[in-house]
Amino acid sequence: MRPVMSQSVGRLKSAEGGRSGGAMGKEERTALLEKLRKLALKELEKRSVTLVDEPWISVTTALSDKDVEDIVLLVLREAKSPLTWREMKYIFAGVVGEDRLRKILINLKAQGVIAELTRIRFALPEYVPMDEIHNVKNPGVLSKILDKARKETLPVN
């Protein structure tokens, strides 16, 4: 059995007053975070291999960086809105440590796969609200966001 870090979801703010992609209420945001956390834990169980499972000890393999990246992208895709650093830490508590999560997010950001917004929020480019394009901190991902905006505004013949 894995130790689960106890952290109160109630302490998590509703993403800076609803700025993370819509006017989502506190209860809705809390439910979303719980759903995302369960998804991350389910993916951890699916991807890790148990080497020893005795009543007194359980040994499992650690996830590779690629597995962690895949889970982060899955969580951001499922969220469909930017997630704060605090929310990411909550979702991945017990899955991966903060330093490793930070490293993975920095790598994904450098590759232009995810967008970092002001107030340390992360999202897939397709889920960055158009009114927050000026808050994107990594310019490499801006072209993906603007391409998406152009496709949405082009008239269909």
Image (cartoon, rainbow, N blue to C red):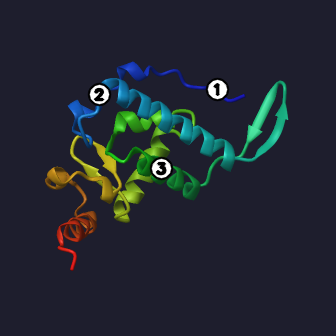
Q: CA distance from mark 3 to mark 2?
A: 23 Å
Q: Is residue 60 above or below residue 94?
A: below
Which sits in the foreground, 30 or 108?
30
Question: What is the x, y in percent for residue 29?
Answer: 36, 31
Query: Disc 2 marks which amino acid?
Result: Gly
Q: Which label belongs to residue 75?
A: none
Q: Which label belongs to residue 25?
A: 2
Nearer the viewer's eye, disc 3 or disc 2? 2
- Residue drawn at (33%, 51%) of the image: 123
Find out whether the residues at labels 3 and 2 contact each other: C-beta distance under 8 Å: no
- Residue drawn at (46%, 46%) of the image: 75
Question: What is the x, y in percent for residue 67?
Answer: 58, 54
- Residue drawn at (50%, 55%) of the image: 69
Query: Disc 1 marks which amino acid?
Result: Pro
Residue 18 sits in quarter: top left
Q: Callout 2: helix, strand or loop? A: loop
Query: Disc 3 marks which amino acid?
Result: Val
Which one is earlier in the sequence, the residue at label 3 or at label 2?
A: 2
Q: CA distance from mark 1 to mark 2?
A: 30 Å
- Residue drawn at (28%, 33%) of the image: 24
Dot 1, how many residues are within 10 Å of its Cα: few (below 14), some (14-19), or many (20+)? few
Kindly identify which residue carries mark 1: 3
Nearer the viewer's eye, disc 1 or disc 3? 3
Dot 3, how many residues are within 10 Å of its Cα: few (below 14), some (14-19), or many (20+)? many
User: Which quarter of the rendering shows the N terminus?
Assistant: top right
Question: What is the x, y in percent for residue 40?
Answer: 55, 41
Question: Residue most toward the right?
Answer: 54
Q: Callout 3: helix, strand or loop? A: helix
Q: CA distance from mark 1 to mark 3?
A: 21 Å
